[in-house]
Amino acid sequence: MRALRILLITVIVLGVLFVIVDRVAVHFAEGEAADRLKSSENLATTPDVSIDGFPFLTQVAGGELDQVEVGIKDYEAPTGTGGRTIRIDDMKADMKGVTFSGDYSSATAASATGTATIAYDELLKAAKSEPTRVGPAVSARVVGLSDGGNGKIKVQIDATVLGVKLPKPVSVLSSVTVQGDTVRVRADSLPDLGIDLAETAIRSITDFQQTIEQLPGGIRLDKVQAVQDGVEITVKGSNVRLAG
C-alpha cells in the first residue's frame, strides 16, 4: 500500500508539474505571437493572443494548434485613397488549424472568422460633409450617422434651399451592404427637401461607400450590419497569416 501511495503521489506531482510547464509555455508562446503580429502588421499596440486547447505542448509537437484567438483594439486599415486610413475597432478573430514553420518564425491559419466595428463618426468621413450643389440654388451635406434600427443606418442631411437653410436636418434610413472590399451605404428612399431634385443628384449626397483595402493577415470582408455603436463587420479568410 505504501508503494502504491508513493506511486500515486509521484504521478500527481508529475501531472501538476506538466500542467505548470504547459501553462508557462503557452503564456510565453502567446507573448511571442503577439509581438510578431504587432511587428508584421505595423500595429500601434500589442494585440491580445490566446492559444486555446490543452495540452499546448502536445499540439506544438504535432506541428499544429487547434485554435488561436486574436484581438486587436484599434486597427488603421488602408483605404487606397491618398494614404488615408479608416479606424476599425475591437477586431476579434478566431483562427483554426494554425501551423507554423520549423523555426517558429511564421504561422498560418487554415481558416479564420471574426468581427469588428466601424464607428459611425469614422464612417462619416467617407460621406460628403461639405456643402455640395444638388440642384439650382440647392446644396446639401451629410452631418451625422447613427443607428436607425432593424439593421439600418440613419443618415442626417443639412440642406440649404434657395438661400434658406432648413431649420433642422432631414433624415433618411439607409441600407448597408458589402461588395468585395467595399462597404456601401444606400438610402432606401430620397429625403424630402421641399423641392424636386434629380435622383442622381441627391443620391450623390445620401449614398456613399468606403473601401477597406487591407485587413490583418489577409482576411476579407464578408458581411456588414448597422448596430448601435456603428457598422459591425464580419470577416473571414483561409490561409490567414498569424505572423511572419
Image (cartoon, helix red, strand yellow):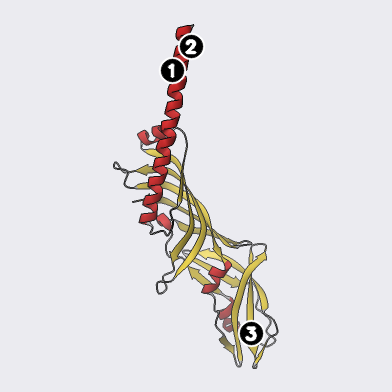
Q: Position of residue 78 (x, y in %)?
A: 42, 66
Decide: few, some or many residues near mark 1? Use Cα within 10 Å; few <14, some 14-19, many ≥20: few
Among numbered discs 3 and 1, the one appearing first in the sequence: 1
The structure residue drawn at horizontal position 64% and vertical position 84%, both measured from the top left corner, is: 159
Q: Earlier in the sequence, mark 2 or mark 1?
A: 2
Q: In the rendered image, which residue does mark 3 sit on? A: 159
Q: Nearer the viewer, mark 3 or mark 1?
A: 1
Q: Which residue in the structure is indicated by mark 1? A: 10
Q: CA distance from mark 2 to mark 1?
A: 8 Å
Residue that label 2 marks:
5
Q: Is residue 133 left or right of residue 7?
A: right
Q: Is residue 241 visible?
A: no
Residue drawn 42% across and 28% down?
A: 18
Instruction: Say if mark 2 contacts mark 1, CB within 8 Å.
Output: no
Q: Residues within 10 Å of mark 2 (few under 14, many from 20)?
A: few
User: At label 2, which amino acid type do we have?
Assistant: Arg
State the separation of the CA atoms marked 3 and 1.
80 Å
Mark 2 or mark 3: which is in front? 2
The circle on residue 80 is none
Name the residue at 47% across, 15% down. 8
Q: Residue furthest top?
A: 1
Judge whether 231 appears above or below 164 on screen: above
**Residue 150 image position (x, y, % from top left):** 67, 62
- State the SS at label 3: strand
Asked whether residue 75 appears in the rendered view, the answer is yes
